[in-house]
Image (cartoon, helix red, strand yellow):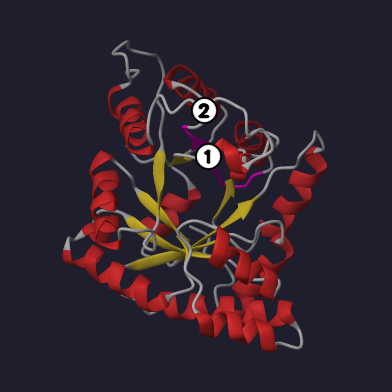
Amino acid sequence: MPAGSNLEAVLSAGRFAVTAELGPPKGTNLGVVERKAEILRHCCDAVNLTDNQTAIVRMSSLACAIHLRRMGLDPVMQMTCRDRNRLALQSDVLGAAGAGVRNFLCLSGDHQQFGNHPGAKNVFDLDSIQLIQVLAGMRDTRRFQGGDEFTGDIPMFIGAAANPFADPLPYRVVRLAKKVRAGANFIQTQAVFDLEIFGRWMAQVRARGLHEQTAIMAGIVPLKSVGTARYMRDYVSGITVPDAIIARMEDAADPKAEGMAIAVELIDAAREIPGVRGVHIMAVGWEDVVPILTERAGLLPRPLI
């Protein structure tokens, strides 16, 4: 059953898709969400709502996704296994689907020790692959994971994350294959800075035919400063930032402009790699840059399907 989301329609039409991340506020001001949503409205096909990203408490992805749906945008509701058990996760899916949310991204979630509640207990009742299976089962059989039937349809376009850069590298495509087999319709990757490693990973993806079973979208993070680049290289697990990019940011008279130039180059390069069907832009609080990047990369206007 088609999910009926705009993201699904763009990918199904064979168009190069664009998604962007919107970080919910650390507070109750929905106006923040609305301002960011209006920035992203015309430059991407769907908007990801992060779910307590980096284990920091923020407005829920569920509430923000429903709000974006009411604004006429196509939300991607991110769901982490860190904070909720299978009852809560399935309950949230029912609520979101009932409000018209169609895209769901299944994630494990950053460990709580990285966030603002390091003493919090994690849950991990399900892992991300199991969550994909649960959602696919709900969609396809109208049954909860425990076997009971429920009423109503849940048209869902199910997504997952993939990291081509985390050790051990040879097993990254194996993990991707498990997510595809579980039912992932689209994949958003970790930030791509090292095109050589990403290209090798995509070659493995193509060798297994996975690019024909799911839509691979390359993660793009625009850099604001050399400090950001170094932090990602040194402290963010699974991100590889080549020395050449660090050097460009160090030598730049205008680091933000250089970061945007690098991001556009990475988008251009990703589009040339066979099997890549879109990009996912993670601006990390710098949503204002997304319209500029997509315009410079020749990705505007977005298709109306």
Magenta range is 72-81
Query: Where is residue 103 drawn, in percent x and y?
Result: 47, 42
Give the CA distance from mark 1 to mark 2: 8 Å
Q: Is residue 302 left or right of residue 182?
A: right
Label 1 belongs to which residue? Answer: 111
Q: Is residue 50 visible?
A: no
Q: Residue at the spot x=36%, y=41% of the render?
A: 2
Q: Identify whether 297 is placed above or below 287.
A: below
Residue type at mark 1: give it. His
Q: Residue at x 49, y 78 (%)?
A: 242
Who comes first in sequence, dot 1 or dot 2?
A: 1
Which residue is identified by label 2? 122
Is the magenta region chiefly helix, strand or loop?
strand
Q: How many marks?
A: 2
Report the residue that reaches farthest toward the top: 148
- The stretch drawn in magenta includes residue 73: yes
